Amino acid sequence: MKNYLSITLLTLGLSLGACQSNTKKATDKTAEKEATACVSDCSNCSSKSCETTLAENKIEGAGIYYFHGDRKCKTCKVVGAKAKELAEKLNVKFFDVNIDQEENKNLAEEFQATGSSLYVKHAKSGKIEDLTNFAFRNAINNPEAYLEKLESTLKSES
């Protein structure tokens, strides 16, 4: 009888723990989804949600567009983090776009981004420059060159 009671309590404890874990993961995923859809320099942001989403912004204005999937390798993380830091330093819009999310599919199609990639869109000309290959080759092994190229691309108006 004691074994039956112990097994029942153990099973109940495990099932409650699993429910809490899944609820937390779902909540974290929702918060991550909202944050990803938000422009980093959005002036309309409230505490955790953003009223201006990428879907509303489309590709208007100059900025750095960093496309990625749900899973990011070390290089992907460095490319995005360094681009975001530079965008903040230069006061340029930075768009962190998860292409695995349905609401970002149209934006990814406009840039023809099918995987991790980095683009700069110029304000005056509207020209879009693809820096993906250079960024991924240099972000870890030669970060100075990566940041110099990104900054010079942002400052040049083609």
Image: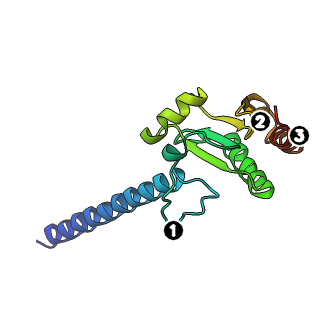
**Of marks 1 and 3, which one's residue comes earlier in the chain?**
1
Q: Residues at badges 1 and 2 in contact (C-beta under 8 Å)?
A: no
Vertical relation: 43 (above or below) 78:
below
Disc 3 residue type (three-letter): Ala
Q: Which residue is mark 1?
A: 46
Q: Quadrant of residue 102?
A: top left
Vertical relation: 86 (above or below) 145:
below
Q: Which residue is mark 3?
A: 145
Q: Residues at badges 2 and 3 in contact (C-beta under 8 Å)?
A: no
Residue occupying image coordinates x 64% and y 58% = 41
**Of marks 2 and 3, which one's residue comes earlier in the chain?**
2
Q: Residues within 10 Å of mark 1 (few under 14, many from 20)?
A: few
Query: Which quadrant holds the N terminus?
Result: bottom left
Q: Which residue is mark 2?
A: 135
- The spot of residue 139 in percent (x, y) is 79, 41
**Of marks 1 and 2, which one's residue comes earlier in the chain?**
1
Disc 1 residue type (three-letter): Ser
Left or right? Give the position of 28 relative to 116.
Answer: left
61 and 70: which is toward the camera: 61
- The spot of residue 123 in percent (x, y) is 73, 41
| Mark 3 secondary-structure assignment | helix
- The spot of residue 106 in percent (x, y) is 49, 33
